[in-house]
Amino acid sequence: MSLPRRIPVVLAAATVLLAGCTSTVEGTASPSPTTAGAPSSSGSGGDQGGDQDPDGLAAGLLPEDAFGAGAQVSPVTEADVRAGAAVGADLAGVTITPEACAQAIQQSQPSVEDLEDFAAQTATSGTSVVVQLLTVGAPGDPVADLAASVATCPQATLTSPEIGTATITFSALDVPALGDGSAGLSYTTSVTGPDGSQLTIPALIAVAVDGDRLLTVLSTSIGGSTDTAAFTDLVQQAYDYQADQLD
């Protein structure tokens, strides 16, 4: 039996997001940069300090005003990357079904060591979080893997004493044809906590390849909603901006 295709970021993002939702109040939770599940830094994968390098990939990140008035835009250090990856990798006591999804999650945990270079930022507005990530050296074929992920794992169920039961449902998302390839995915995580409380977390993710660079954009809203049209416009803007700044 062959292993399923890698699903980089997507299922890992969902598991980290669930782990990050430590409190629920009337159907909402407080997001943090690492709950979005995407690594973020202003330097290279080997730079432990995470200091911003204006001549590196960070120059290709969108300016603050691209995310709308009032958005809080922040870089996330390599320490945040490692912390988020540790949360996503800690699946002790978590039951994941079906088996294809369990294998995909185990293969998709983010790792700084997998990347030659990366830069990213988060933009937070209320309960909504957008993550923009630029990487060099991402393993596998992220566009093909993302495009195939709905067939690999259309729905996953995660159960643990800490989070209760979560159902993650995936569907394809149309995104602009960009660069050397692009793909999108929409997924909704429905969580029923051990105390019976419920939380719905929609998310949109898109990837696009530009030469040796990979752009990843993730948008989620804890207890809220996502705007598909606005998201695809932002993906186009993010791709064009990094191409203008870095090519």
Image (cartoon, rainbow, N blue to C red):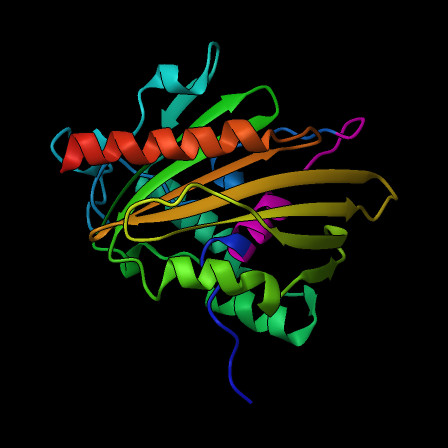
Q: How far across and down, in percent of the image, does residue 179 sit? A: 28, 46
Q: Quadrant of residue 116?
A: bottom left
Q: Quadrant of the C terminus?
A: top left
In the image, is 86 to the left or to the right of 14?
left
Residue drawn at the location 35% of the way across and 66% of the way down: 140
> Is residue 21 in view from this perspective?
no
Q: Is residue 22 magenta?
A: yes
Q: Nearer the viewer, residue 243 or 155?
A: 243
Residue drawn at the location 47% of the way across and 42% of the way down: 175
- Taking 70 as reference, is 43 above or below it? below
In the image, is 94 to the left or to the right of 52?
right
| Residue range (magenta) | 11-27
- Residue furthest to the bottom: 1
- Taking 4 as reference, is 11 above or below it? above
Q: Quadrant of residue 104?
A: bottom right
Q: Quadrant of the N terminus?
A: bottom right
In the image, is 161 to the left or to the right of 87?
right
Q: How far across and down, in percent of the image, does residue 200 sit? A: 74, 39
Q: Nearer the viewer, residue 189 or 213?
A: 213
Q: How far across and down, in percent of the image, does residue 152 sit? A: 58, 69
Q: Is residue 205 magenta?
A: no
Residue drawn at the location 73% of the way across and 50% of the way down: 163
